[in-house]
Image (cartoon, rainbow, N blue to C red):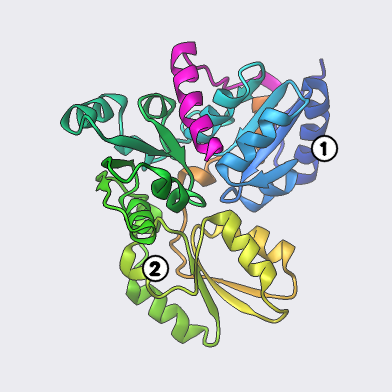
Amino acid sequence: MTSYQKTGNADELIRQIGELKQERDALILAHNYQRPEVQDIADHTGDSLELSRIAARAREAVIVFCGVQFMAETAAILCPEKTVLLPVREAGCPLADTATAGQVRQMREQYPDAVVVAYVNTSAEVKAESDICCTSANAVEIVRSVNAGRPIIFVSDRNLGHYAAHMARRRVILWDGACPTHAGLSVADIRQAKKDHPKTKVMAHPECRPEVLELMDRVAGTAGMLAYAVEEVPGTAFIVGTDIGLIHRLQKENPDKVFYPATDYLVCPTMKLTTLEDVMRSLENMEHVVKLEESIRVKARSALDAMLAV
């Protein structure tokens, strides 16, 4: 195998990554919040579940998942026959860390008749203790699908759970967890952004606080925001209430429109850990392989399959 050298030259890094990808029979996936240069070298960009589905259908033997831990785990849950690599081991998710499998079991004891809905932004162990998963795109539909006579425990983002409960008109037991990036967006931020950029459409992720979502023209996950941008006429300007990484893809796909971040601090730090050098090193050394206990993988897969059935 070719020996690769660390280099600060982006073009050379991209060339080396391309060669390594072929040698390893690998597919590179990047979440919409990744650094622009990482998105640009990926074979596919998307949200976490979309990318995991792509991984499951892929012919390649190796999946390099440029995202955070729970995303790479979800890919490993759906395609156990493939090798899934997470370029940066430390790329975790503060939201996912707010829930453990033991805590979910305790909640089940407290509410024995409840259906546990696990946001995809949770660990494999938490998914394995849950009945059904959801994404930001289908949380309302999943909550609405639960038998009306049963309580619902929503793990782990309280803001997304509140939004889903409100839209589905269901009572939900909310987990005390939140995405610190989205939860930090305030009403004052939105008002200032609208003052700075008048006559704009405003969209935000449902992980934002309820009072922020009330000010939106569109509430949607990243895939929904991408679709919303395409729907509008050329020249439309948008204020984007999610991680600024999405603006790179929004602008690439809609060069005839304008996008402004709701604030400059809408940045998930762990999503920005992965660099081109990390991707190259991951391919060269086959690191870091995502490994799951088979019993956990099978149970977690059951919760994901329940979601897909809905």
Establish if 62 lies above or below 55.
above
- Residue 308 image position (x, y, % from top left): 55, 37
- Give the CA distance from mark 2 to mark 1: 43 Å
Asked whether 20 or 77 is in front, the reply is 77
Q: Which residues are magenta?
A: 284-310
| Residue 81 picture location, percent across and down | 66, 16
Residue 181 in picture, x, y percent from top left: 40, 55
* Badge 2 element: helix
Work out which residue is located at the far left of the displayed protein and give it: 110
Evaluate whether residue 247 shows in this view. no
Nearer to us in this view, 269 or 104: 104
Circle 2: residue type: Leu
308 in relation to 80, above or below = below
> Residue 13 sits in which quadrant?
top right
Residue where numbered disc 1 is placed: 15
Q: Which residue is mark 2?
A: 213
Q: Amino acid at mark 1?
A: Arg
